[in-house]
Image: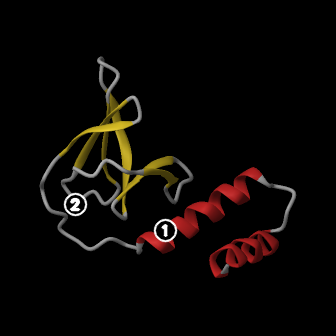
Amino acid sequence: MDTKFTWSTNQKGEKALLYKNYLYRLRRENQNGSLIYVRINKSCPRVITLKNDAIIQCDVTRHNHDPRLTEDVQTVFTGLKCHVINDVDQSIGKIHEEEVKKICE
């Protein structure tokens, strides 16, 4: 099982898990410290369980839809969001230019 994931944010700015181009939101934290993440698309049945920032269980159900964005595009959006949040004094236009330069290099 591929266990590589990244942290992202959803449209509301809440922390989300990005795994294989699909976003997951936190459903609950179990008493044993594990976290249950479900797909942001409520009609999708996929669930991921994390413990100590590692995927310990991922159901094998197939997604009933395609991912919204390619991994490259999602990575760019995640980078832009982080940059905007962490550098509030800089204009969004300037941040966008810097991120585009990173991609083109």
Residue 38 point in image, percent of width and height: 29, 47
Check if mark 1's residue and mark 2's residue have beta carbons within 8 Å. no
Q: Residue shown at 29%/18% (left/top)?
A: 32
- Which amino acid is tagged 2? Ser
Q: Is mark 2 on a helix, strand or loop?
A: loop
- Name the quarter where the C terminus is drawn: bottom right
Q: Residues within 10 Å of mark 2 (few under 14, many from 20)?
A: few
Residue 73 point in image, percent of width and height: 50, 74
Q: What element carries label 1?
A: helix
Residue 43 point in image, percent of width and height: 22, 60
Residue 95 against residue 29 in the figure, above or below: below
Q: In this view, does 87 lie to the left or right of 61?
A: right
**Residue at the farthest right position:** 89
Q: How crowded is mark 1: few (under 14 residues within 10 Å), some or many (20 or more)?
A: some
Residue 82 placement: quadrant: bottom right
Q: Residue 74 carries which label?
A: 1
- Which amino acid is tagged 1? Gln
Discs 1/2, front: 1
Residue 19 against residue 64 in the figure, above or below: above
Along the line of sight, which residue is nearer the eye, 9 or 105? Answer: 105
Q: Residue shown at 30%/17% (left/top)?
A: 31
Q: Mark 2 points at which residue?
A: 43
Q: Residue shown at 57%/67% (left/top)?
A: 77
Marker count (numbered): 2
Q: Which mark is residue 24?
A: none
Task: Work out whether mark 1 precedes mark 2 in sequence or the reverse, and give the earlier one.
Answer: 2
Residue 10 point in image, percent of width and height: 49, 56
